[in-house]
Image (spheres, rainbow, N blue to C red):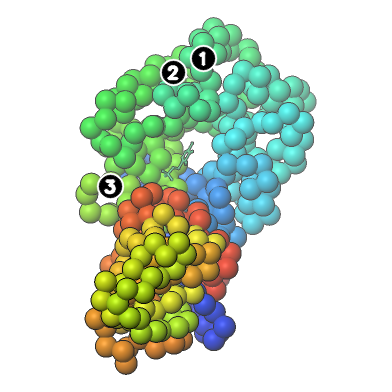
Amino acid sequence: MSGADRAAPVPGRAGTVLDIDLAAIAGNWRRLQAELQPPALAGAVVKADAYGLGMAEVAPALAAAGCRLFFVATLDEGIALRRLLSKAEIAVFDGLLPETGGEFRHARLLPVLNDLGQIAAWRAEAQTRRLPAMIHVDTGMARLGLPPDELVRLAAEPDLLSGVPLAAVMSHLACADEPLHAQNAQQLGDFRRAIAQLPRAPASLAASSGIFLGRDYHFDIARPGAALYGVNPTPKRPNPMAQVIRLKGRILQVRDIDSGVTVGYGAAQRMERAGRVATIAIGYADGWLRSSSHRGSVGVAGQQAPVIGRISMDLLTVDVTGIDPALVRVGDFVDLIDEQHGVDAVAAAAGTIGYEILTALGRRHHRLYRGGAG
Ligand SMILES: Cc1ncc(COP(=O)(O)O)c(C=O)c1O
């Protein structure tokens, strides 16, 4: 963790503490910006409440670090971000839903136009003054963005964009976290061909992992999200990003258990020998996913204690048999996520990805923000 701790002390009633290092997020953004070849710029993706870490705290910290371009998913997120940052450029991935043009204009948001219908609707908004927008061209996700036939039409009829200066033309990589995947080069080629057919505009292809595919993928704007928040953008290699969060949970009860006793719902796990179990104040309602039942471990007094039994809504049970009882007391904290046992390790135990762990964290944790600009 870096940055001065200006947060209030943890109240005794806090069952869990989520410690978020804003200076580490800002440092990660600088690290990603440094990876790019100037004049390419790193924006910041702060959708889903900055991947669960709090857009209201994260976005100003990134702006203070020098970030000028932000991406959100929904119009509501864009409006909320505009209230936080009056000067930043804010683009909305989900695009222009019917009847929302006025709200985009009012909040000075850039819609990411995903099809010709959205382009026509935004052009209608731009009757009296020029209104910039981004365009998303699909090159291999079949999710959002202009499909190939619409790109052909747009290239043939550039007037479809009159009055709409392009703030960027973007596409999104499906397999950037697998550097050897053939689809990366295919999408790169298709994106190059797409931008060559459209009016000149800044181009954007790479998100977090794409930045680490090399300069060919950088273009003018990168759109990192997960890497800002400490998720490893290079999954098979050491994580180049700093860890951003720590999560601690309080021990609520410690008990001696006889051999053969079952622990938790479904009586799904039986103690094979007599031992001790500690119950921790975190469950799937706090983003400690049920899929990590019987899997993974938590740090108790510096040692890893295996999770036993099913995760329930508010509780988690761990086997502390081998740990000195004097170090396992009610009210003590155990380490759920820390530098040694980061978001990606927790995700692996739950059979998912770090993105899901972060965005599932929920609002029940006592949050401590460190290293902010203010
Ligand atoms: C279009 C687009 N760009 C960028 C991102 C950020 O991706 P990452 O979090 O992998 O950096 C996302 C996230 O899903 C996205 O949908």
Q: Residue at x 39, y 66 (%)?
A: 309
The residue that disc 2 covers is 194
Marks 2 and 1 close (CB-CB < 8 Å)? yes
Separation of disc 2 and disc 1 at Cα? Answer: 7 Å
Tell which residue pokes out farthest to the bottom in this image.
326
Of residues 203 and 303, the one drawn nearer to the viewer in this rendering = 303
Q: Amino acid at mark 3?
A: Pro
Of residues 30 and 334, the one drawn nearer to the viewer in this rendering = 334
Separation of disc 3 and disc 1 at Cα? Answer: 33 Å
Across and down, in percent, residue 315 comes to 48, 70
Q: Amino acid at mark 1?
A: Leu
Image check: 192 left or right of 361? left
Q: Residue at x 62, y 42 (%)?
A: 74
Q: Residue at x 71, y 23 (%)?
A: 121
Quick one: label 3, few (<14), some, or many (20+) residues within 10 Å?
few
Across and down, in percent, residue 98 comes to 73, 28
Of residues 66 and 79, the one drawn nearer to the viewer in this rendering = 79
Please determine whether, in this image, residue 304 is positioned above or below residue 24.
below
Q: Nearer the viewer, mark 2 or mark 3?
A: 3
